[in-house]
Amino acid sequence: MPLTVLLADDHAMLRSGMRAIFDTQPDLECVAEVADGKAAVSEVARLRPDVAVLDIRMPKLDGLGATEMILSDPANRTKVLLLTTYDTDEYVYRALKAGASGFLLKSLPPEELISAVRVAARGDALIDPSVTQRLIARFAVSLAPPPTPPELELLTAREREVLHLVAEAYSNAEIAARLHVGDETVKTHVSRVLAKLGLRDRVHAVAYAHVNGLVQRR
Amino acid sequence: MPLTVLLADDHAMLRSGMRAIFDTQPDLECVAEVADGKAAVSEVARLRPDVAVLDIRMPKLDGLGATEMILSDPANRTKVLLLTTYDTDEYVYRALKAGASGFLLKSLPPEELISAVRVAARGDALIDPSVTQRLIARFAVSLAPPPTPPELELLTAREREVLHLVAEAYSNAEIAARLHVGDETVKTHVSRVLAKLGLRDRVHAVAYAHVNGLVQRR
DNA sequence: AACCGGGTCCCCCGCGCGGGGGATTTCCGA
DNA sequence: TCGGAAATCCCCCGCGCGGGGGACCCGGTT
């Protein structure tokens, strides 16, 4: 059973070019050609091809919007490959967020387009190398821990410990119980923390700690 | 001038296999073979090849550690391609964070390894499709805004407004001034917010707001 | 007309908090 | 040996905060 493919691009010439590429492969069948995003969405819903190859620039609904509509349907099984001339970062992010299986440039050699369709059909994904480079950079910063502000170095280990607990909204008494010390001790630590960090009260300390990444979200 | 390549893998057989692959290409020159990570780092520093192909599993220093050492040198110009048998997510993240130009599985066809080296040499990057799939999923969640907890719906617009200001550590008096209302009014709003969200005091409110992504970090 | 939710303002009360002092012990480096 | 930093504990004082009441006005629904 061959893999079924839908082509969406507003240039008839490019569509027939791609169709010709797929026709060289016995196991790939181009089941539909459409010229705009809305048609792509409805034809994908009707024919349920294995892979939809969408241009980003299309009338009525662009390829990104079509991708979002197609992939937001939980019953959908069609994988989406996006094709574009320009690799604007915003396009890439939106495509990946929507769950596209590929983001490729039109400069792609024909044989790689074929292999991309097979990759997408088996559930994997691929991104054009020129885009991957920037994606990695962006991903790296999203993984990187936020920089620790230098004034934190002024704090002693105990004070940092107390600050962490303050950041989690514990009262002085609760912190005292946790650390097995008197609450007057905690008050002293908190006071020192506020003074060293130039914060007015524990409320500012909580905000400070969260903004500076001392506490994980969720 | 040919592209120079360094090979690092602790299996001599695999090294000679790869060298044979590169030897078929007149414009690729394998300038060194090493069997461990430490040797890879020092040979890269000495020979400054265009691309280093590193196995992840290696003695003394693994491929990830070697990648980090190589790429943390600001004077370095060598691109790093990582090769592995298993595509553990943690490996991938660490590799990308270090700035690797590629993350490939050893099942890669020889001709694709060649093209991968050329891609890396020209400053682009590529990731094995099976890994890309999961990377996209991970990237999508990192882009997605944190889900808004349902109890926030209980708040009126004004109360949400006040909550945002509380989250930024403003005192009741400061909030009152900002909103051009009396401070008694603010107290009422804050009380309602605390009651509706089940929070003890404004300190908990600040932590709540930050944990639930109501405030941007930095 | 009566009702109600939302926004505004008011008073009282108790308490946690933060600043101002000071004190002790321990430990480490000069 | 003598500092000094760090951690611990103590007292007093003023104030911001939060709860518990109540009140008024407005706009929309019933």
Image (cartoon, coloured by chain):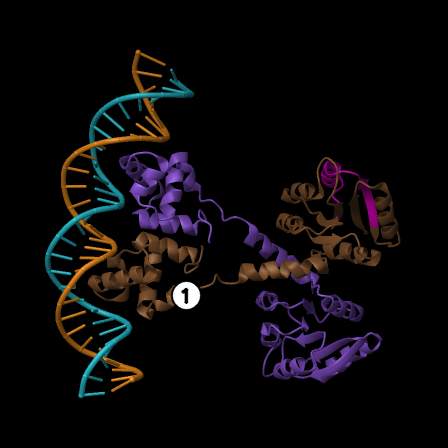
Chain colours: A brown, B purple, C orange, D cyan
In which quadrant is the N terminus of chain B drawn?
bottom right
The residue drawn where x is 27% and y is 55% is A171
Give the camera-side residue of A29 and B196: B196
In this orientation, which residue lies closer to the viewer: B21 or B176?
Answer: B176
Q: Which residues are magenta?
A: A29-51
Residue hosting label 1: A150
In this picture, residue B147 sits left or right of residue B77? left
Image coordinates of residue D13 in percent, x first then y, are 13, 52
Horizontally, residue B83 falls left or right of residue A11, namely left
C10 or D22, nearer to the observer: C10
> Can residue B82 be seen in this snapshot?
no
In the picture shown, does residue D5 fall above or below A105?
Answer: below
Quarter residue A119 falls in: bottom right
Is residue B133 in view from this perspective?
Answer: yes
In the image, residue A30 sits, relative to residue B33, either above or below, namely: above
Up/down of B82 relative to A138, above or below: below
Q: Position of A217 compared to A101: left or right? A: left
Residue C6: image location, x then y, percent: 37, 30
Whether A16 is among the magenta residues is no
Residue at (79% x, 45% y) in the render: A7
The x and y percentages for residue B165 are 38, 43
Q: Amino acid at mark 1?
A: Pro
Q: Give how far across and how far down residue A190 sits, in percent.
A: 28, 61
> In the picture, residue A113 is in which quadrant?
bottom right
Q: Determine whether the residue tagged by mark 1 lies in a helix, strand or loop.
A: helix
Q: Which chain's residue wears label 1?
A: A
The residue that appears at 61% across and 83% down in the rendered structure is B38
Question: How many numbered discs sit on the rendered protein?
Answer: 1
Q: Is-magenta flag for residue A39? A: yes
